[in-house]
Image: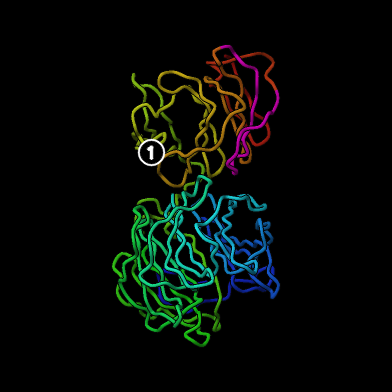
């Protein structure tokens, strides 16, 4: 591990579950994941670590298919694996929910079966850069991280190459080094939100490939690799400026075919281009108020710091702030990291099943979480750190149904049980502790 903001040598962190090369890696604010690789057999293992705590990795689950030379990228919720060798090149894209251990799920397909590729992300979009098919390619394609589906063509690198080290801010992805057919020192960038070709805007201090790339959304690091011998060099670059990379420090030992991740990359820093402060640390001290009527439909929602008196401040919007995208009579509750607003009414007053979520630690718009078992409004919700439980409501007839979500996992609600009668409206008075939830009146 290194502290990206401060030059210096790497220090020992721990060990993976299995020894392997050519893995993919990604991270949330909390966890780092490494997947696939070869040992020398090709494996489907996914290992994880808690970034703030030094120590050995633990088993997370398995990829949908065993493969090596894949690339991973992520936002704060999902980690996505792209391509790789099985040993023939694969077009597979699969994903995991980083907060919940378990096996990967199919996401879609790349535009071409590709190995030795590189992927980076903004908070909403993942991009795949170069690779080989088996010829070296300059192709860039992209996916929207929180939806599933096949990748779409984005543009082209300045040079066809594989074995790239990648890094990103919330707006730019960069590709450092690689080979095609000679080892390259080229550094390209793309603007992730807009399709188009990459622009050459600097060079590594030496040609290099199979290095790892990481960033804190301001600085990009190229770590180790083959130049052409195995190196322990770490180089740095300012993502927003470009130019030639300079020395940062050294790895614990010379290493190539490695994969790196960080807890501050572009997929975690929505719209801030590296200027975002550290994640909100006042756990248990943010209150959030979502949507409603004012008397028209209200799209925005706001927050207060509960321990301090003062006015509320803008947190984000129900979806994109467009007229008619708001909601009222939804049921809200949350866990340690996420808040969920379930069901409600839209404009022009239809009952809704779809539910949205937000991340308490970062301001921004709500995103889709899943659906209640059926559309209704005027329900009530309570939660502990694991489950959000939604009870009653109207369709317009009153319901006694109780649903629940597992707050850490994006998915539809499941049946929990029934209230002792169909109830709505004043049921918004609800609460609980770690084990028991109460619904009052209605």
Residue that appears at 56% across and 76% down? 257
Residue 15 belongs to the span the image colors magenta: no
Where is 106 relative to 66, above or below? above
Image quadrant for the C terminus?
Answer: top right
Residue 400 belongs to the span the image colors magenta: yes
* Residue at the bottom extreme of this rendering: 229
Residue 259 visible in the current orientation:
yes
Instruction: From the image, tell me which residue sits under label 1.
Output: 316
> Position of 163 compared to 155: left or right?
right
Where is 103 relative to 6, above or below? above
The local secondary structure at tag 1 comes to: strand
| Magenta residues, start to end | 397-417
Disc 1 residue crowd, few under 14, some 14–19, many 20+, Cα 10 Å: many
Front residue of 185 and 254 = 185
Q: Position of residue 167 (x, y in %)?
A: 43, 65
Q: Position of residue 77 (x, y in %)?
A: 53, 49
Residue that appears at 62% across and 32% down? 413
Front residue of 6 and 281 = 6
Q: Position of residue 127 (x, y in %)?
A: 45, 58
> Position of 232 compared to 374: left or right?
left
Q: Quadrant of residue 293?
A: top left
> Position of 41 compared to 352: left or right?
right
Residue 52 visible in the current orientation:
no
> Position of 341 compared to 40: left or right?
left
Where is 251 relative to 169, above or below? below
């Amino acid at each position: 591990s290194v502290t990206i903001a401060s030059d210096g040598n790497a220090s020992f962190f721990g060990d993976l579950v299995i020894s392997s090369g050519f893995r993919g890696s990604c991270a949330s604010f909390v966890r780092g994941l490494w997947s696939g690789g070869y040992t020398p057999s090709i494996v489907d293992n996914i290992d994880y670590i808690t970034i703030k705590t030094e120590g050995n990795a633990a088993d997370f689950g398995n990829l949908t298919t065993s493969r090596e030379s894949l690339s991973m990228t992520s936002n704060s919720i999902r980690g996505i694996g792209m391509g790789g060798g099985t040993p023939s090149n694969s077009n597979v894209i699969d994903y995991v929910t980083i907060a919940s251990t378990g096996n990967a799920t199919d996401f879609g397909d790349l535009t071409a079966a590709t190995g030795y590729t590189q992927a980076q992300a903004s908070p909403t979009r993942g991009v795949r850069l170069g690779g080989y098919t088996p010829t070296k390619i300059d192709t860039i394609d992209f996916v929207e991280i929180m939806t599933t589906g096949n990748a779409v063509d984005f543009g082209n690198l300045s040079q066809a190459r594989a074995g790239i080290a990648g890094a990103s801010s919330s707006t730019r992805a960069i590709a450092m080094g690689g080979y095609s057919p000679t080892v390259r020192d080229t550094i390209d960038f793309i603007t992730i939100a807009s399709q188009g070709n990459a622009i050459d805007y600097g060079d590594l201090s030496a040609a290099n490939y199979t290095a790892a790339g990481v960033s804190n959304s301001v600085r990009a690091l190229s770590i180790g690799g083959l130049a052409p011998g195995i190196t322990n060099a770490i180089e740095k670059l300012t993502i927003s400026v470009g130019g030639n990379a300079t020395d940062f420090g050294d790895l614990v030992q010379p290493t190539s075919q490695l994969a790196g991740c960080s807890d501050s990359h572009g997929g975690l820093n929505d719209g801030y281009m590296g200027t975002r402060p550290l994640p909100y640390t006042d756990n248990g001290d943010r209150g959030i108020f979502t949507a409603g009527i004012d008397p028209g439909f209200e799209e925005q929602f706001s927050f207060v710091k509960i321990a301090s008196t003062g006015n509320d401040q803008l947190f984000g919007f129900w979806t994109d702030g467009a007229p008619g995208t708001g909601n009222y009579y939804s049921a809200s509750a949350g866990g340690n990291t996420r808040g969920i607003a379930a069901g409600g009414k839209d404009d022009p007053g239809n009952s809704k099943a779809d539910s949205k979520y937000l991340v308490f630690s970062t301001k921004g718009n709500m995103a889709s979480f899943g659906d209640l078992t059926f559309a209704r409004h005027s329900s009530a919700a309570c939660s502990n750190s694991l489950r959000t439980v939604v009870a009653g409501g109207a369709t317009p007839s009153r319901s006694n149904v109780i649903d629940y979500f597992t707050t850490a996992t994006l998915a539809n609600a499941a049946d929990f049980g029934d209230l002792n009668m169909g109830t709505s409206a004043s049921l918004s008075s609800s609460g609980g502790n770690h084990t028991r939830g109460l619904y009052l009146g209605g």
